[in-house]
Image: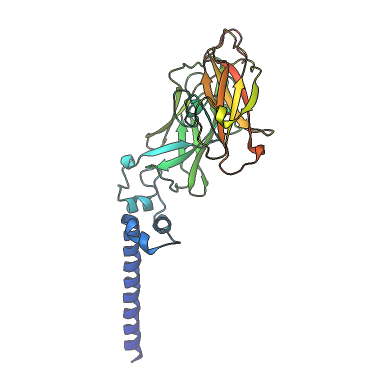
Amino acid sequence: MIRSFLLRFSLALVGMLLLCGTAYIGFGWVAWRHGEWLRPFFKDQTPENIRYYYQGVAIALFPGDMDGDGAMDGLEILWGTKLRVPESHDITIQRLDHPEFDAFDLRSHSTSFQSGTNAPYEFFLPRINQRLRVRGEVKFDGYREPLPRGFQVRVTARPHWLLALPGGKLQDSALIVPVTHEGRSGIVDFEIQPTEGAFASTESPTEISIDNPVTGMHLSNVEAKCLWPQPNLVLTTEDVPLNHAPVYVRDEGNPRVYRLQWPSAPLSAEAILVEAALDEDGAEWFPLSFYSVTDTVCFVVQHLWHSESPALGLKFRATPVRYSPEAGAVP
């Protein structure tokens, strides 16, 4: 009697577990493949959050990385990609050192921190014989995904360029960089430094390659232009009323217009680099735009989207630069 009861109870329990497991997996499949179907039924818990939850379950069950491409096996099973084929994913490294302000050169009338003819932010701009930190986030097919423990990338030095881990010893050979974890992000962090033999051109930057040392797959390029700076020019800055700007500026985001003026550049200069930083001690400088050596004036607009405080204003500097060593350069 008791044995028969226990047998029936066990079978019912197994059946219930199988039913719950099937429903759990089925719901996860629907959330993963057809998340838009669930959107009308969820307000606080979005389908994206549900997908992240199931990703965590898959990663916990299959935390390895058979092909060494950086995509954990649990994710590859969910994605339906091949566990032993590293070419299944488009893995890139996205630059992270974004400025804490929104400003652009009115000449281009588009944000200088995106690509553009006069927007140098798309390149790293180290001064000659000076270290510059490079930080990037690893993305899979454009998305932020967790990485297996111990994942590394390899950075290959170019002639006359040195590499190092942050604060580490500089070397002229390939550098293995461990990928650290910040939340769901995988972060690549290292330093570059051009030496006297390095040079750049106005058209093309130096490309420092980043690849996967296990698979040999190319991941990304660090595009850099080394600069031979000359002494900064004396710069005068004044605020300009919005209706006196040389071009129309939309009255959105509490815009503030600056007029910058500097004296003529030395004849040995090839360009003038204008940079901006928050108007506070120790603020990091970011490039705004390159100007011709014949330019002496520019207008910059800053948007204060989150505050109207004047403490969020900017300071500027104008530096004549060369792309190769010549008389007047200051290494």
Q: Quadrant of residue 192?
A: top right
Please tell me whether residue 84 is drawn above or below residue 118 in the rendered image.
Answer: below
Q: Position of residue 96 (x, y in %)?
A: 51, 37
Q: Nearer the viewer, residue 70 or 150?
A: 70
Q: Position of residue 325 (x, y in %)?
A: 55, 11
Measuring 51% from the left and 49% from the top, which residue is drawn there? 183
Q: Nearer the viewer, residue 164 or 29?
A: 29
Q: Position of residue 23 (x, y in %)?
A: 33, 68
Q: Is residue 20 left or right of residue 191?
A: left
Q: Where is the N terminus found, in terms of image quarters? A: bottom left
Q: Is residue 304 left or right of residue 248?
A: right
Examine the rendering and report whether any part of residue 45 can be seen: yes
Please tell me whether residue 246 is drawn above or below residue 214 in the rendered image.
Answer: above
Q: Where is the C terminus found, in terms of image quarters? A: top right
Measuring 47% from the left and 22% from the top, which residue is drawn there? 158
Please tell me whether residue 310 is drawn above or below residue 23 in the rendered image.
Answer: above
